[in-house]
Image (cartoon, helix red, strand yellow):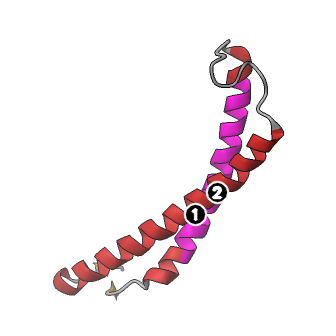
Amino acid sequence: MEIRRIEPLSLGKITGLIYAIIGFFWSILLLIGANVGGNTTGYTAFFSNQILPINIGWFIIIIGPLLYGIFGFISAVFFSWVYNLLAKKLGGVQIQ
């Protein structure tokens, strides 16, 4: 069996959703790290030794997965387009 063509939008939708889920978990880790790091290191230039305001937290939780999903979608569509071009000339990936 050989994969000769990848449908760009199909791969983009799935990859965008997977990246959005990953982005959600990275956003949570970012918030935890920023809150812990801002309170224990004494570094006051950015966080002023305070826990992040809840508004910034919600912004990160929303914008992180959204950006991850968008860039995941775009990169998957680009990858499938390049794959389709190369598969025409070189042949597709063989699966057994």
Residue 5 placement (x, y as % from top left): 35, 86
Q: Is residue 22 magenta?
A: yes
- The residue segment tinted magenta is 13-36
> What's under tag 1, amino acid-wise?
Gly
Give the answer, above or below, for where 95 lies relative to 50: below
Residue at 66 percent across and 54 percent down: it is 63
Task: Tell me the number on the disc at residue 52.
Answer: none
The residue nearer to you, when weighing 30 against 5, is 30
* Cα distance in 3D space between marks 1 and 2: 6 Å
Q: Given contact means CB atoms under 8 Å apart, are the residues at marks 1 and 2 in contact?
A: yes
Quarter holding residue 83: bottom left
Residue under the point 74% across and 18% down: 49
Res 3 visible: yes
Give the amino acid type for the residue marked by disc 2 in the picture.
Pro
For label 2, the SS is helix
Q: Alpha-carbon neighbours of circle 1 within 10 Å: few (<14), some, or many (≥20)? A: many
Q: In which quarter of the image is the C terminus?
A: bottom left
**Percent position of residue 56, x then y:** 74, 41
Q: Using residue 66 as the reference point, say whether residue 94 is left or right of it.
A: left
For residue 69, which numbered disc appears in the image? 1
Q: In x, y percent, where is residue 55?
A: 80, 43
Please tell me which residue is depicted at 72% across the width and 49% down the height of the picture. Answer: 59
Q: Is residue 1 magenta?
A: no
The secondary structure making up most of the magenta span is: helix
User: What residue would you read off at disc 2?
Assistant: 65
Asked if residue 56 is positioned above or below residue 11 in the image, the reply reads: above
> Which secondary structure lies at badge 1?
helix
Say if residue 19 shows up in the picture.
Answer: no
